[in-house]
Image: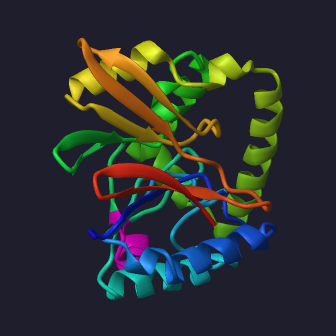
Amino acid sequence: MSKAILFVSDLHISFDKPQITRRFLNFLAQRAKHAAAVYILGDLFDAWVGDDDPTPPNNAIRQALKTLTDHGVAVFFQPGNRDFLVGERFTADTGVSLLGDYAVIELGDIRTLLTHGDLLCTDDLPYQAFRVRSRSPEWRQNVLSKPLWLRLIAARLFRLRSHFHKRGKTMAIMDVNQEAVIHIMQEYACQYLIHGHTHRPGCHHFESDGQPAQRMVLSQWSNAGGEYLCWQNNAFKTESV
């Protein structure tokens, strides 16, 4: 039996969610330890204000990831909309490899596109405008140059503002746009797409260029539990933690 490849996203780990932290640490120490690779597709953290932030449980997560990569498991991290400030110090501390906004891997002989998912929510125009601004080197440098205490306060205010903004948006606007999905899959010549972000887990079947295609949406973790996607023996399955 071949080793599994695991995909996870949207844990939103923070100090006030200790159950999710414990669940993820157990996942890394037990299930992930026996995998060939682990792909974390964004929003591992509820907020990441810089690699210099020691706020619990950040150091515990760093150490657990380092233990896993030292064990020989390849771990890849694709930043999400909550933790896009993860940088080189984090990768050095953990042994994790950073991925860009889109990454292509081979599962068996099938090209598979990985992304966090927020770029595909093209109907959410205010968010897309903010995303363009916040990914610029100038914006990043400006934020990371601020004192840590100020960045932590700003992150709390941003999460609060985000909460109220979402209340004024429809679910359709916050979900991916199917035309954008097909366009990006054709651009990267992929048959599978795996993403998170929308918190609407499921498997969607459709056609792209006359060929069957699949879009697999990863689950958000909560205090009640969590799920991850497993690829093993040329098949997908959802497993629970």
Q: Classify 123 as above or below 28.
A: above
143 to the left or right of 237: right
Nearer to us in this view, 92 or 240: 240
Is 73 covered by the magenta stretch? no
Relative to 45, is 66 on the left or the right?
A: left
Identify the residue at image location x=66%, y=17%.
172
Q: Residue at x 38, y 30 (%)?
A: 214
Quadrant where the C terminus is found in the figure? bottom right
Residue 136 point in image, percent of width and height: 41, 40
Observer-nearest of 163 and 50: 163
In the rendered view, does 90 fall on the left or right side of 11?
A: left
Q: Looking at the rendering, in which quadrant would you find the N terminus?
A: bottom left
Q: Determine whether 94 is above or below 41 in the image.
A: below
Colour pattern of the rendering: rainbow
Confirm whether residue 93 shows in the render: no
Q: Quadrant of residue 11?
A: bottom right
As for residue 94 lying within the magenta part, the answer is: yes
Can residue 143 be seen at all in this image of the molecule?
A: yes
Look at the image and give the residue range highlighted in magenta.
Answer: 88-97
* Residue with the most extreme left position: 109
Q: Locate residue 114: give its quadrant.
A: top left
Q: Where does the image place residue 190, in percent across and percent down from the top left? A: 24, 32
Place residue 87 in its image quadrant: bottom left
Q: Report the front residue among 114 and 150.
A: 114
Residue 115's place in the image compared with 57, above or below, is above
Q: Is residue 151 above or below residue 178?
A: below
